[in-house]
Image (spheres, rainbow, N blue to C red):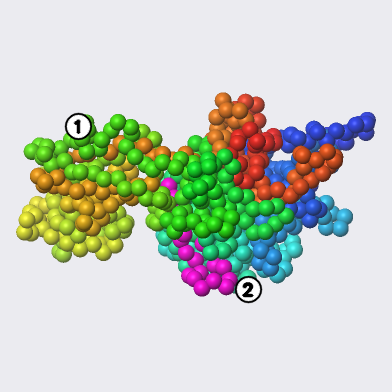
Amino acid sequence: MKHLRSLPLAGLALLTSCTNCDVAVLTRGNLDRVADVVVVNGTDGNSYAISANPEIEHLRVLDLTLGRFTAAPNRFSALSIPTGPDTRALTLAIDAATTADDPTRLYALDGSDDTVSVIRLDKDGSNPPFVEVAAFATGRAPVDIAALRTGTSTVVAVVVPDTGAVELNAVVGDVVTPLGSIALPAGSHPSAIVSDPLGRAFVVADAVLPQVHVLAVADDGSVSLDRSLDVLGPVQHLAAGIVDVGDGLAPVVVALRSDRAALTAVRLFRPGFREDRYAVLGGADLPALGEVAYVPDARPSAAPPTVCCEGLSAEALAQGEASAAFAAVWMADGDLVYVQLAARQIDGVALAPGRTLVRLIDDDVAALSPPDGIDLNTDEELWVPAAGGEDRRPVLSLSAVDNFGSPPLVPLTDPGTSLLLVWEGDLTAARRLRGTFAIADNTFVTTVDAEAREVRVGDVARLQRDEPEIDCDPSFRARITAVDGPLLSLATDGAEPFLTALQAACLDPDTGDTRLSVEAQGAFVVEDAGRSLGRLAPSGSAEDVVTLAGVSLSFVPNAAGLPLPGSRLAVPLDPHIVTLGMNLADSVQAGGFGTAAFVPTGIDGGTVIIPDASSEVEGAVIPARRMVLSTGSIDGTTGLPLLLTCDEGETITSRVESFR
């Protein structure tokens, strides 16, 4: 146990000659590359944003109600709470009884000295608030933290990737008791954790397995692994809130993928509903890699729920784009966008069933289409046939669909992009898969699920050694006769060549690694800038449609026959998607924030008490639904780190306030 850190005087002693101690000096809090932020409604009636500043090893406290940083005992300086050398994750506990944040304690995780600090946020008799009152050790290199309160005890969960586990400690008052750890499924590498907003579970992200893991919390505070949900890829960030998913309010967790610019939304357990306790709502592609996200709490409060988003055109409103069930995603390019989370009605008006899925909020009512002046079926520059197949150009069709969300994940296309269709080309997602070839029964076991990578019976497998001997034939091919997850059965007789003795020696697992590539048969392989969008077979066949954002793509063969292997067809597309959000990286725009927004580190918010700018009464305050955003970079115009605050669903950058 380390020594507790006491509240500092933070600078020079109070100057007794001060006759007009103007609190305006506290609009600057000396922030330094903020790593995380949490918003808390204090027991004193004020709302606070508490930020982690790892480079200066302190927490700062921004009073959102007074619009300034909380003063230290030396009121010329901002209050500073000492923490460890690399405190990068903060959390409050969800109280299971009230399903609200516990405003009395903050938990700060330091990944360098492997410690959790417990910060008291309220006054305790004559003892001041914002003081560290306890600390406890964690496993090596923890990365995230969450907490749930049941009765008088708070369970603090810490993610430790090295052990593939979640460590648990019970905090009662200022006393900490270790509870052991929860092992996650084999191969897990946990990357983030968040508390269920209703206080019934923890949700853990996985940086390796394509899953999130749900740890159920019983009434007595005991924790157990309930299940793992497939979210289609590894995850690097989680955000939780409560929104109307179409049939009532539900706790929802948004998982930001680490392998692609996409998110998946998961609904958690809600009492009184006859449904699976946990379910994947769907997913959506994003314009850029999502770094951090925010899901509002749409339950009734002192402020009306936010309907996202201001600025939507009348046409988009008529199509039902506005929604109180949304998430904000701050992306690696500095842009913030809003995503609809399965809302089925706006102001009591039911939407069409096709608009109930997870999708970007879009302000362009036009559907995805070819650029003006381009005919996909006649433009000669788009068709590059294999020799002898010039007259086998297929006839493409684009059919508009109402939705461009999931399931399971509908890809976006970038402006100016061209899809590439290759007839019987290599499956992008199954190119050079590592595995083991068993000569005795002609099977190949990959290290991934081949079925999930579009591999089908009838496709052709091409096996090759990473570093073949000089006399090895590198072109061994076989027909795939069965696919069972990672296990492929191969046929090496009949139309395909027999496995010769020389090839058998080359592919012997004892002599090195083997790689497998798969050539689709009877279908186009569809790619977008090297990303696989699936396989496209002739209309009327299995897999005869590739679904894109706003349209489905299909084709019928030419009367002269199917294309020859290797034939290529380019499909240029204009996505007609205008996202709602804010550009927080462009200092040229009015209200921009320079390079600060290129390193998003956190978003938190909720119903808070803020100054009433419209009132003529000094000190008047109002409740409002706000977000606070933190960044690990600096403002390109001032060279100072900062926090950003704005309304939920804000789309006008000039309305964003900054505190440094």
Q: 136 above or below 529?
A: below
State which tag comes first along the sequence, 1 or 2.
2
Whole-percent x and y of residue 392? 13, 42
**Where residue 443 sits in the image (x, y, percent)?**
19, 61
Using the rendered image of the protein, determine whether residue 352 is visible from the camera's viewpoint.
yes
Q: Is residue 265 magenta?
A: no
User: Which label is found at residue 219?
Assistant: 2
Q: Is residue 281 magenta?
A: yes
Which element type, helix, strand or loop, lies under badge 1? helix
User: What residue is at 18 percent from the left and 55 percent from the top?
Assistant: 459
**Contact (Cβ within 8 Å) of mark 1 with mark 2:** no
x%, y% of residue 615?
A: 80, 40
What residue is shown with label 1? 380
Amino acid type at mark 2: Asp
Front: mark 1 or 2? 1
* Vertical relation: 605 (above or below) 443: above
Q: Amino acid at mark 1?
A: Glu
Which one is nearer the viewer's eye here, 554 or 525?
554
Q: Position of residue 81 (x, y in %)?
A: 74, 45
